[in-house]
Image (cartoon, rainbow, N blue to C red):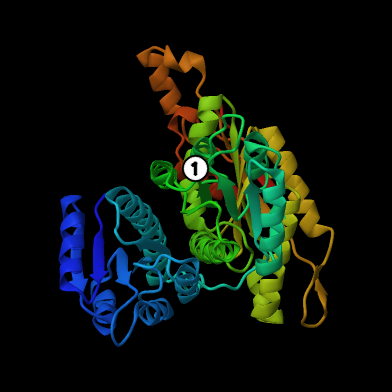
């Protein structure tokens, strides 16, 4: 795995040795000799990971870490603090400063590379989310970006799995008291996996040795393989000296590990750090999802917009053809809508559009595609709906608009509105069309012109999303020309 790593240490020999070890594993390592230099390098070079010595003259590692995490340009970069004392008090102080992990000297290659692989992998995942978020904003999709590593948020949900139920209850009481989280205690690993899939927790704390020959590594692997649980933060508790198990856990997707018996305060601090990082990643995903929704939805009505509808209509046609079912397509246009805007104002017009969208959605199925195509024109695409079924839906929508006045804020408070609709249907190809003679195929092509209320049929083999929309549009204009407040259907062969 590639990665750019900044090594910060006031001892030149330490920097050179660590850089050589990382370079041998194909990481790109560069160095800084003190805290201020580290801050400058981190902002300018944007490393994937920072290895930061605690004991440095002037600005020590704690202060450097606090400043790195306070700067929005470097807050997302994982920081591993290097220590020689390796006490719980020192680790807790570092975690409070924002450190993501610790390595104690002398540093074993197994632990070094396991920690580095894990944190670089997580950093790259966060970077991808940040890049997508920045791209969305550059395109004018204004979903709010999260504050880096903010501790604010709803009450976290934590799952705790230990071989000894007494240990589980004691740790649960500590976490609930110190972090105000909700703690779940599944009876075993199978129950934990089923519960997590049904209602994913924010974090899971589990022992590697779960008793009865059950290994927590299998549960970690299963969680990471399932879409519902792959983003759960995982802290694994391992026996003292079990570096191989700890490294395997990190490689399988654990976010952190602790040796047992673990200091309760350190467990609290490490879990708090993981919850902050999980919350930040979740907010990035939410911002990206919201931004994408803003790109494909109409802000006034909440319906899909034209860009999405035209793209999705092609997919719906392919799916319906593969399933051998028809696809009904209906275009609707509010009658004399310009008069509403001119007489009552654009605010009243917006109220009418929003209420029409609500009535439209209330009278179609959940599987139907409903979109605002622009202005007062709307689209409904209905899988498995032929001419008769589509006409029933269109007439139901027409009556829902005509029979109940629309409430507006301007005088007179309520107005009457009607809608016109044009319907057409794409039928799946008939088996005989596949074995037809050239003469038959020519005859079908010659009869392919669309008809409005009785014209020539259109064979489904000629249908595209554009031709469907054009046919529905012609039917819609036929409804307008026939006096409005009507439904016109094109008939396919």
Residue sitting nearer the eye, 480 or 156: 156
Residue 332 lies, in percent from the top left, at 63, 54
Q: Find numbered disc 1 in the image and state the secondary structure of the residue it sits on.
A: helix
* Mark 1 surroundings within 10 Å by alpha-carbon count, few (fewer than 14), some (14 through 19), many (20 or more): some
Tell me: residue 203, above or below residue 54: above
Give how far across and how far down residue 430 sits, in percent.
Answer: 52, 19
Quadrant location, the C terminus? top right
Q: What residue would you read off at disc 1?
A: 224
Residue 434 visible in the displayed image: yes
Please give the count of numbered marks on the rendered protein. Answer: 1
Q: Quadrant of residue 72?
A: bottom left
Task: Let me know if residue 485 appears in the view.
Answer: no
- Relative side of 53 to 153, left or right: left
Residue at 48% from the left image edge and 74% from the top image edge: 93
Side of 493 where 103 appears, left or right: left
In-image side of 34 versus 352 (left or right):
left
**Residue situated in front as seen by the camera: 336 or 68:** 68
What residue is shown at x 77% (from left), y 58% (from top)? 401
- Image coordinates for residue 121, horizontal then vertical, percent: 36, 53
Residue 412 rendering spot, x and y as whole percentages: 82, 80
């Amino acid at each position: 795995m590639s990665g750019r790593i900044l090594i910060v240490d006031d001892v030149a020999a330490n920097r050179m040795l660590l850089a050589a070890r990382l370079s041998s594993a194909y990481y790109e390592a560069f160095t800084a000799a003190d805290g201020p230099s580290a801050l400058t390098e981190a902002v300018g070079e944007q490393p994937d990971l920072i290895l930061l010595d605690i004991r440095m003259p002037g600005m020590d590692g704690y202060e450097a870490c606090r400043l790195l995490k306070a700067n929005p340009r470097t807050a997302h970069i994982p920081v591993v603090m290097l220590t020689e004392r390796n006490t719980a008090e020192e680790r807790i102080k570092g975690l409070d400063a924002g450190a993501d992990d610790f390595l104690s000297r002398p540093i074993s290659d197994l632990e070094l590379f396991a920690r580095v692989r894990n944190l670089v992998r997580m950093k790259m995942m966060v970077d991808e989310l940040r890049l997508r978020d920045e791209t969305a904003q550059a395109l004018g999709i204004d979903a709010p970006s999260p504050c880096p590593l903010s501790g604010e948020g709803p009450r976290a949900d934590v799952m705790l799995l230990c071989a000894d139920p007494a240990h589980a209850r004691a740790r649960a009481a500590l976490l609930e008291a110190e972090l105000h989280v909700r703690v779940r205690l599944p009876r075993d690993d199978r129950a934990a996996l089923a519960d997590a899939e049904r209602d994913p927790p924010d974090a899971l704390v589990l022992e590697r040795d779960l008793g009865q020959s059950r290994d927590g590594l299998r549960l970690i692997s299963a969680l990471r393989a399932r879409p519902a649980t792959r983003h759960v933060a995982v802290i694994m508790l391992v026996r003292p000296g079990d570096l191989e198990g700890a490294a395997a856990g990190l490689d399988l997707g654990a976010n952190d590990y602790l040796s047992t018996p673990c200091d309760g305060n350190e467990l609290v601090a490490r879990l708090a750090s993981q919850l902050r990082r999980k919350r930040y990643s979740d907010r990035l995903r939410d911002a990206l999802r919201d931004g994408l929704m803003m790109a494909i939805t109409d802000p006034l009505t909440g319906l899909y917009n034209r860009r999405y509808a035209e793209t999705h209509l092609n997919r719906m046609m392919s799916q319906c053809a593969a399933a051998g079912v028809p696809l009904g397509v209906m275009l609707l246009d509010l009658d004399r809508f310009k008069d509403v805007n001119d007489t009552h104002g654009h605010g009243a017009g917006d109220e009418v559009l929003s209420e029409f969208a609500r009535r439209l959605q209330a009278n179609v199925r959940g599987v139907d595609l409903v979109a605002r195509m622009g202005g007062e024109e709307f689209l409904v695409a209905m899988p498995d709906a032929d001419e008769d079924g589509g006409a029933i839906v269109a007439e139901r929508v027409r009556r829902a608009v005509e029979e109940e006045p629309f409430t507006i804020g301007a005088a007179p408070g309520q107005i009457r509105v009607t809608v016109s609709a044009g319907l057409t249907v794409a039928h799946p190809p008939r088996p005989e069309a596949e074995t037809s003679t050239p003469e038959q195929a020519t005859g079908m092509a010659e009869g392919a012109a669309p008809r409005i209320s009785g014209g020539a049929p259109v064979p489904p083999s000629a249908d595209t999303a554009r031709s469907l929309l054009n046919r529905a549009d012609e039917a819609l204009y036929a409804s307008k020309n026939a006096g409005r407040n009507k439904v016109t259907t094109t008939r396919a062969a």
